[in-house]
Each structure stands twice: as structure tokens, then as C-alpha cells.
Amino acid sequence: MPTAWSFEMTHAPALLDVAALRQDFPLLTEPFKGRRLIYLDSAVSGLCPRSVVERMAHYQLREHTNVHRGVSTLSQEATDRYEEAREKVRSFLNARSTKEIIWTRGTTEAINLVAQSWGRANLQAGDEILLSAMEHHANIVPWQMLAAEKGATIRVIPMNDAGELILDGLDALLTPRTKLVGVVQVSNVLGTVNPVKALIQAAHAKGIPVLVDGAQAVPHLPVDVQDLDADFYVFSGHKLSGPTGIGVLYGKRELLEAMPPWHGGGSMILSVSWEKTTYIGLPGKFEAGTPNISGAIGLGAALDYLKALGLDRIAAHEAALLAYATERLEAIPGLRILGQAREKASVISFVLEGIHPHDVGSILDHEGIVVRAGHHCAQPVMQRLGVPATTRASFAYFNDTADVDALVAGILKVKEIFG
Amino acid sequence: MTDPRELYQQVILEHNKKPRNFGKLDPCTHHAHGLNPLCGDDIEVSLVVADGLVQEVRFQGHGCAISQASSSLMTVNVKGKTVEEAETMIAQFREMIRGNLDPAADPHILGRLTLFQGVKDLPSRVKCAVLPWATLHSALQGEETVSTE
């Protein structure tokens, strides 16, 4: 007779074969400067599996020319591969149409696009932009630049000491002057998974659109932009096992259609004359110039790779690793984890009493352990927590408990050196 | 790669824990602010220079053990020196950290500051060790702010 436990097990996703999939990453299997590399820095940038790099190399060597140009078979096929990648992103986000998927250089450029195109057309003096206390600089500075230009104001949803947004006062923060809410779905510093769906519902009840920064969410959670009802959703390819220099702006079609172009140039026009220039429709309207074609195809290959591993299996593996790492790190005297949200992705920021994170990072580096030490491009989060910097370990699907054990041993060595 | 123990020696750890000449001189004759925004190290150096001599020097701010100990040992070593000697030490310290001055072979007036020579093997930490010295240089040159990033 099946017990409750075995019932759960039969319904749990099959486990990832981490030892096998690590073979896809030469940095993990081959010695780096004479030692085994422990990569706990996927929140900075994910590692690209071999298949992604090979797909990009194949394109660049055998399929490349410019896209959306000319009548050659080569150009048509390059265009097809490029547009197939856009369809993969559409499917990944469950967007209604590929017209809603705009290629950008990354999360930062996507947010700047919205600020400069949508923001400049829709904001006036006295208007407000509501951001959360745990935004990355990428979702702060573009809005500050816009606010300075328009005479608008930035307001902030506060967070508690555990690193969770305080939503009790949200209603009062969503004022008649609020024109946009910008919120990070997963905090890059704290790992907090924010309740963006509820936040979007609250904003929509007052007719306010919401931009979701999904840079740290897409590697960990399945995302459905229709279910979230996000107005804009942005992310970067390189956090998702893809290459750098490619990212995505998802926007609701009616919003994107009403927005003026941002960059002008080739590819985004219908006709150009000295008297009058007209623009093409979505998504090309926002894609002036020759795009990052191999980057887009590489991102498509990364999505294929993750899909084959299984997003549910990745999530289950990372959740187990987060629980194990949290328990082991918490047991180290003098170590304090920052960010104790109930809903958390596999990112752990910590401080060691009396030891600066850069010293921690340097000594761990000597042990072959790659972590991030610093302010994580989120200085307001550091100010809120009252620390100048933290050390952050972030765990991906290719990490295992041996990596956590190595981190713990490395931290004990730091403590030993510092006495 | 240098063993971290070669760098994080007792003297450095001790100066990090109990920095000498910590604080701000008011009034002072020279003052500068050093800031490395990427890593967050933040150091203010103030001096009283009279008759060509560094009569008093203090620093305050926060950062890693390397930048704190470098600041502390800098104040101890430049106090009482001529401005010219201080500038020579700044130049020699910088060259040592960049690997262009070998304290065992080349002439220098760095004294115990040679403790920091291991930093040359940690390229990402060079800017931490050099920040207080660049700040001291700026102060002596009459410049207000500096960064070594």
C-alpha cells in the first residue's frame, strides 16, 4: 500500500542527472588553473552548455548573412533561424504572438527601451513611477533619468528585514499620479520571489501598467506572461545559459503598437524620404540596425537545452540544493544569511562577522570557488540592510551538494585565516 | 597564485582590526576622498603639512582588510616624512603592487609596507591596496576625489 511519502515520490519530477549534464560544461569538468572549479555565480552569468556554443558556431560558420535583407536563399534561411528563435522565446514566456517579443541587448536595454519610448510618451511633470526596494540598478537608473527629464517622482515599495516586500501600504502607494510600476520578480541579492501576480492585479485595478524585471526569475521559475498579465516583461539571455549581448522585451501588443520607435535606422522603416519616413510594425519597429543574430539563435538553443532538462526538474533540484545550502551555511558561527523570504530562489547572500566580503571572495577564489562579492548592482538594498557589501553564492542546475560542501569548507578556511 | 595566508599575514589582519590614525583631522591642510564604486571601498585622507613635513595624517572610511590595512600602515609610515619622501613612497608602493619593483632587489624606502607585495598576484585586489595611496597623492596634489578602478 503506498504511503503518503511514496505517493509524493511518484509524482515528483524525476531527478536531474547532474553528473551527466556537467559534461556539457568544460569549465566544470576540466581543471581551471590547476584546480576543480566550483561555479556558484550563475546569478552573475550562467554557463553556456556546449550545445549553445556549437549552435552559434554552426550559424556563424555555415548559415550567416544579414537577416530581413535581400532575396538570397542564404539570407532567407538566416532570417528563418532568427525568427525561429523568437518563436522559442514566445513559447517560453507563453506570449500570444511573436510580435510581442522584441530582441534587445539584455535586460538593461529592454528597460531603457520602455523608459525612453513608453515613458517619454506617457509621463508628465508630477507623475510617479513606483519601484520596489529590491530593484537592481537596471530598474532604477533608467527611471531616474526619465523622472529627471520629465519632473516626475520615484516612489518605493518598502521591504522588511527578511527581504520581503511590504504590500500592506501598496494601495496608498498606487496613487492617481502613478503611471507605471516596475518590480523585480526574483531579487538578485536576496533570492526573494516577489508576488508579482498579486502586485499586477492591484496595479491593474487602478489602470496602472507593470514592468516585471525577470532577469533572475527565468533561470529558476516557469514564467507565463499571460497568466501574470504583465504589461512588460524583460530578461537577459546570459542568465539563462545563453550568450551575452542578447535579451528580450516582452510587451503587450497594444502597448507596443502605441509606443513610438526608440532607435531609428535600417530595418525599422517602411519607407524613407526627406519629406516623410514611416515605420514597419512589430516587432521590427523596435529593432533598428543589424541585430545580434547568432545571439538570438544561441538563446533559442539555450531554451531548447533547458526544456530538454525540464524546467520542473530544474526547479526541484535547485529547491533541494537551496534547502541543503541554507542549513549548512546557517550552522557556521558568525555567518548571517541576508534574505530569509518564505518564497526564495537558489541565491544566498551572506556576511561573515568582522570579515569584509571582498576578503571572503578572494580566499574562496583561491580555493577555486567562484562567488560574487560586492553590492550586486543593488546599492539601495545594501543601504536598507545596513551592509556595504555581501558575499553571494548562487546555485544552478549543474551544481550539487559537493559544491555546497566545498563552499562551506572554503568559508571555514576564511574564518581560520582571519582568526 | 599566492597562498592567501602569505597576503593575510598577522600584521595586515591586526591593522585591519585595529587601524592606526583612524579619523579625520580638523583643521587640516590637505584632504581627499578615494572611492572605488564597483567594490565599495571608501577612504578619506586628511593631513596637516607644515614646513614640508607630514606632521599629522589620518584616514577614515570602510572597505576590505587589504584597503583598511594599507591605509593604516600608510599613515604610520608617512607620518613625520617630508612631502617628497611621501610621494616617493606612493610611487614605489604602486610599482611594487604592479610587480615593477622587487623589494628584494630594487632600492626602496617602503620598510614594512613590503608586506603588501603579495597583492601583485591578486589582480582583482590591486585597486584595494593602492586606493589609500592614490588618495594620499590626490590630497598632496590638492585634488579632492580619486578612484583606482
Image: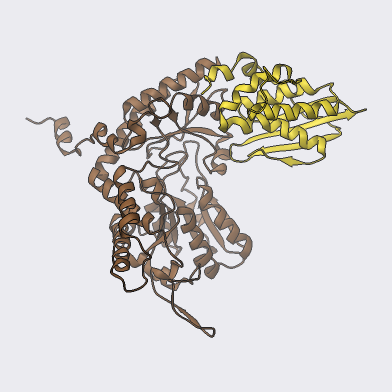
Residue nearest the viewer, comparing A181 with B106: B106
Q: Is residue A230 left or right of residue A94?
A: right
In the rendered image, residue A411, in percent from the top left (x then y), is placed at 46, 22
Residue at point 63% right, 60% down?
A: A148
For chain B, what colour was chosen? Answer: yellow
Residue at point 48% right, 27% down?
A: A365
A290 versus A138 height, above or below: below
Residue most toward the right? B51
Residue nearest the viewer, comparing A275 with A93: A275
Q: Is residue B147 left or right of residue A198?
A: right
A290 versus A416 height, above or below: below
* Chain painted brown: A
Residue nearest the viewer, comparing A146 with B88: B88
Residue B1 seen in the current view = yes
In the rendered image, residue A388, in percent from the top left (x then y), is placed at 59, 34
Q: Is residue B85 left or right of residue B50?
A: left
In the rendered image, residue A389, in percent from the top left (x then y), is placed at 55, 34
Residue A224 seen in the current view = no
